[in-house]
Amino acid sequence: MRIATYNLRYDSQPDSITVQQSLDNLPDPLQAPTYYGKKGEQPWSTRRIKVYEHLQYEGVVLAGFQEALVRQVTDLATLFGDGWGWVGVGRDDGVAAGEFSPIFYKKSDVELVSNDSFWLSNTPFEPSKFPGAGSFRICTATSLILKSDPAAPVHFTYLNTHLDDQSDDQRRLAASMMLVRARYEAYKTGGPVIITGDFNSPSTGTDSGAYQIITGQIAPVAVNATFAAKYAVPNTTLPDFKMLDLKAETPREFVSGEFATYTGFTAPGDGSVYSRIDFVYGGSNGKWTADAYRVGSSLTDDGVLASDHRPVFADITLH
């Protein structure tokens, strides 16, 4: 199963151009572009086809997005077509306002059993923002069945999220909450657990708290009592549960592509803001094997960056 996580960059330059108009205006594929003719951030109407092409060509069956406004969600649903489903809500109101962290799934390969969303704050069951955070933050949770082998379908859990860019305390709380939920799902289902997202937290350095918490390197922080009770697990069950960075779990010869996942809309060759903050994790309870891992490119020869992040792809065998 190939899974992707991709921060789309929100639609900061909205226009009225439809998906069909973008498709109708695609350039002649045999005509050379003006190399690096475009610079900086381009409108979503220019970027969306490239986002779709990156994912469609790679053959993903499951994708978690971040920063997707409702127009971006519906555009991708149009491009992927009826063979795909998606779930998620706008983080500002639990319906359609603000950014989504949606999960898209290919219906022929993956069946949706259930889904819910919770806020990464002190009041997780209602639209809310952690004190000091720059934005509302949400996690989309799904219970899924992988149907690749009809004789042996695999039930698994998949969470997708986007942590705060301003508050390290929010990121630490968010990682702690997702660890609680992931451990509970591993206990309840006995199946694999996957988490993807933009953590705004590298694996090392002063802002690495969220990464270190979710990977078990430092202790989690206290979470909302009601949330903790709802997803409680017996103390003796999976006591050392953590999430494992799939890049580290994949055989070295099958780790490819770039290192940084965030590039900004900088000029080609300018790595001044590059960082690795987008991740794919698997639960330490196992039931999965990391087969391959690749960070793709968002840049094409015409100079268009499909996003200020790069797509991250992981090939995972579920057991």
Image (cartoon, rainbow, N blue to C red):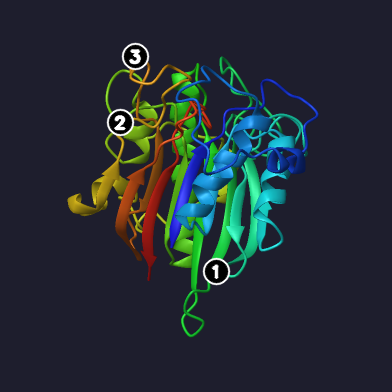
- Please indicate whether residue 256 sits to the left or right of residue 36 in the image: left
Q: How far apart are marks 1 and 2 (CA)?
A: 32 Å
Q: Distance between the residues labelled 2 and 3?
A: 18 Å
Looking at the rendered structure, the kind of residue marked 3 is Ser
- Please indicate whether residue 10 sits to the left or right of residue 20 in the image: left
Q: Distance between the residues labelled 3 and 1?
A: 40 Å
- Element type at mark 3: loop
Q: Nearer the viewer, residue 224 or 87?
A: 87
Residue holding disc 2: 203
Residue holding disc 3: 272
In percent of width and height, residue 122 lies at 59, 29
Q: Which of 226 and 151 is in front in this view?
A: 151
Marked residue nearer the N-terminal end (1 or 2) = 1
Residue holding disc 1: 109
- Who's the residue at 46% across and 27% down the image? 171
| Rendered view: 13 above or below 157 | above
| Rendered view: 122 above or below 113 | above
Mark 2 residue crowding within 10 angstroms, few (<14) / some (14–19) / many (20+): some
